[in-house]
Image (cartoon, grey):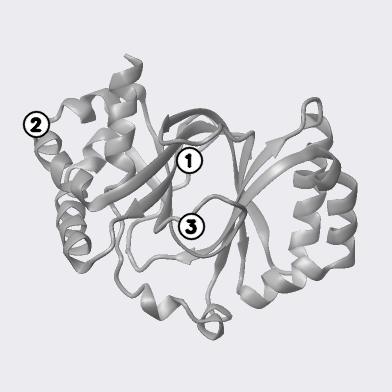
Amino acid sequence: MKSLVMGVMVALLTSCSTNEEKVESNTKQKMNNQEIINVALFYLKDGQENKFEKLRSRGNVLLEKYGARIERVIKPTTVAQGDLELPDEIHFAVYPNMEALEAFNKDPEFLALKAEVVAPSVEKMYGFVTNKTAFEFTREIGDNNKTYGVALVYFKAGKKYEDQFAEYHDEACAIIPEFGTHFERFLFPIETKGELAQPSEIHRFYFDSKEGMQQMVTDERMLKLFPKRDESLSKLIFILGEAIQ
């Protein structure tokens, strides 16, 4: 059962994304006019979970000063695909633009919070500054009862593989909604903090049921598409978890 569910999730997370217009998103000047989503994978020191909760409660108040917010916090339960130590929490913080992010990072109250909470409770952290990809989709919002997926997707270099993945993307997106899959974010990383390599895209989504996932992995239409998908990827890290915010 576990392997079947994992296969479904790996299939879903690489489906509805696009590489179009990425080059245009790379300059800092343009980023100042675009919404920024900061993605952070936290690894906590033993026994420091309660102390780290202050980062969420007090951090949200400080973010409001800059028109920002913690949008989603995922508590990982499994690394279903890829070589990665299981994080303790994954945070998604949304800022109106790059200037707001930079101002928040210099805020004296936030710096004091980092010294008080983050430094003594966090063993290590991987972070990605991202913006939204050009892919258009109906963004849906899940709740804390759903199973969540966070995918770090790495594409092979070259237009050949971009075109191949685009073909897979178009075909898969016509099938996936039938199985109760809901996408919340498609993100394009532009900056990286930590030793984890910068992915091509980061996806966040949730599932209505495990039954739907199981049906997905055995669907004949998707089985025919999987080779096309696999040939376009160089690496995939896929994390399952629950929403705690």
Question: Which residue does the image show at 31% across and 14% down from the upper left?
Answer: 1
On the image, numbered disc 2 is attached to which residue? 220
* Among the 4 quarters of the image, the one containing residue 120: top right
Q: Tag 2's secondary structure?
A: helix
- Front position among marks 3 and 2: 3
* Horizontal side, residue 23 vs residue 174: left or right: right
Question: Which residue does the image show at 28% across and 50% down from the upper left?
Answer: 233
Q: Tag 3's secondary structure?
A: loop
Furthest residue in direction top, as rendered: 1
- Front position among marks 2 and 1: 2
In this view, 115 is above or below 47: below
Q: Earlier in the sequence, mark 1 or mark 3?
A: 1
* Horizontal side, residue 184 vs residue 113: left or right: left
Q: Earlier in the sequence, mark 2 or mark 1?
A: 1
Is the residue marked by circle 3 packed among few (<14), some (14-19), or many (20+) residues within 10 Å? many
> Along the line of sight, which residue is nearer the eye, 166 or 215?
166
Residue 159, position as x, y percentages in the image: 20, 68
Q: Earlier in the sequence, mark 3 or mark 2?
A: 3
**C-alpha span from label 2 to label 1:** 28 Å
On the image, numbered disc 3 is attached to which residue? 198
Residue 182, position as x, y percentages in the image: 37, 43
- Residue 142 badge: 1
* Among the 4 quarters of the image, the one containing residue 36: bottom right
Is the residue marked by circle 2 packed among few (<14), some (14-19), or many (20+) residues within 10 Å? few
**C-alpha span from label 3 to label 2:** 33 Å
Furthest residue in direction bottom, as rendered: 29
